[in-house]
Image: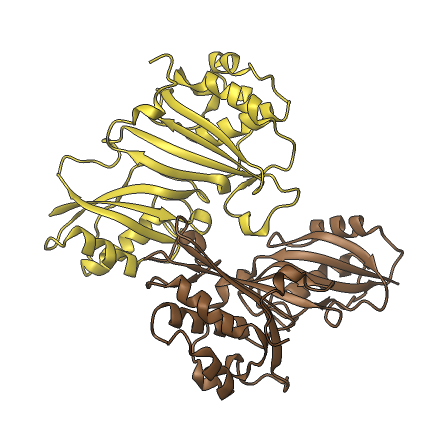
Chain colours: A brown, B yellow
Amino acid sequence: MTRYKLTMAYDGHLFHGFQIQPNQRTVQGAIEEALMKLTKGKRVVVHGSGRTDAGVHAKGQVIHFDYPGKTIPAKNMMLALNSLMPTDTVFFDSEIVDDDFHVQYSTKGKWYRYIVDQHHFVDPFRRFYTGHYPYPLDVKKMQQAAQDLIGEHDFTSFAASGGQIKDKVRTIYYVNIQEDPKEKKIIFDFIGNGFLYNMVRILVAALLEIGNGKRPVDDFPRVIAAKDRQEVRGTAPASGLYLYHVFYDKVPTKYRLDVKNN
Amino acid sequence: MTRYKLTMAYDGHLFHGFQIQPNQRTVQGAIEEALMKLTKGKRVVVHGSGRTDAGVHAKGQVIHFDYPGKTIPAKNMMLALNSLMPTDTVFFDSEIVDDDFHVQYSTKGKWYRYIVDQHHFVDPFRRFYTGHYPYPLDVKKMQQAAQDLIGEHDFTSFAASGGQIKDKVRTIYYVNIQEDPKEKKIIFDFIGNGFLYNMVRILVAALLEIGNGKRPVDDFPRVIAAKDRQEVRGTAPASGLYLYHVFYDKVPTKYRLDVKNN
């Protein structure tokens, strides 16, 4: 038995999310199907660093599994899986890890990216890969408001209800919002020790309200303190969200400089 | 009756090409269906500047049609069609033109772009939007060879057989090949007075052979003179091709500087 850790990208628009589900096309399901071809029918359980919802993409999802057969060099395992997997997924890094490595519990942080398309009409080439927001946005206001998110907070107001996780305290290390006026894109980056269900998409929805002047720029301390999902009703669409990177070493200092409360 | 000229982009990967066909999803079919909603059932024939094949994209396809109802301002026509059309198409320019304007016969030139993805494995986010070529390429060699394409030539060797057009003489005004090493992309631009069936995809296939050292860099004069499609057997995949711009005024001088024979 050999434990493999692999890093992958996927276009999420034709997947019903990462987690395996009966009669649905999922990323985990596609990987397990490919592995089954290698093991000649024996199921290998695939663990992901975290789930992504239907339509959400990954540029740096990390998985691990215990391969029951003879040890294969890490690079060859990657090549074999790439040749067996559908073209909306690709593995680009691979290593053999110790048995105490766990792709979910060993994480030190996660980086999510959200891309907003600002074209007046939906750009056909971006319809699956961005969230569309054609209204005016004041990026400086969003940047200013984002500073109030950084640090350790109870993010109940920014979590979809219905999750099983009771502890809603998370630390956001870094938020960056950059505009690409030529491409009519706005890119939101969030790095933290973990994110609640739908949290990034709810944060983006709230930031867009601030950028559009519908919500005061200094509203976040109040919203956080309220611990009430009703304070932020919107959720930005899945199509704009990317699991961008998972940290297994300490999150680099350059992404922690802004942390106030921790 | 009012003649409208509209400029549009489309993601071609879910279309069976531009030209209407029974029981196939086509761009022309989608536009005519939208127009039928405006005319309450009366068919309006849509003309395109040219056909694009299944899977080929457009960043600047141009169409015209004669609208039988009351004249609608050009911008409102565009807004109405955008709201009625599927999201893999978008109109971004619109004007009312004289009755003697014809989107196909009034063209002065066409600009096609071809994008090659050089990642080792297919990038999931580019699988529908590039042609994949993971082998080494010498861009300078391709640029050098491309100079032999410029000018007025009989391009029989670069045309798919079976077309009805007998005159295979076309003029290429401009070829530019640029590398984006950071993005692992190579972008081919071709501007000419017209292109034969599959010509751009065959040109790209031949240029890739030159870039990869499979064909001599000075081979094109010989290939052109041979007037034989067997000289270039390859055709680059449709997914990388974009109808980028159609010229209705004279092609700007900056794109004609290189023309030798004309």
Q: Quadrant of the N terminus of chain A?
A: bottom right
Q: Is residue B233 visible?
A: no
Residue A44, image x, y percentages: 79, 66
Relative to A103, say whether B261 is above or below. Answer: above
Res. A46 in view: yes
Frontmost residue, A16 versus A151? A151
Q: Residue at x 21, y 52 (%)?
A: B43
Residue A162 is situated, as x and y percent measured from the top left of the image, at: 56, 85
Relative depth, front residue between A167 and B24 = A167
Q: Position of A134 compared to A14: left or right? A: left
Residue B237 versus residue A160: which sits nearer the camera?
A160
Instruction: Give residue B61's position: percent from left, percent from top.
Output: 33, 41
Q: In the rendered image of this protein, does residue A94 appear above or below residue B189?
A: below
Tell me if A33 is positioned left or right of B151 in this view.
right
Q: Position of residue B19 (x, y in %)?
A: 35, 43
User: Which residue is pictured at 50% across the width and 17% down the height?
Assistant: B228
Label tally:
0
Q: Give the residue displayed 58% in from the left and 38% down from the top.
A: B181
Quarter of the image containing the C terminus of chain A?
bottom right
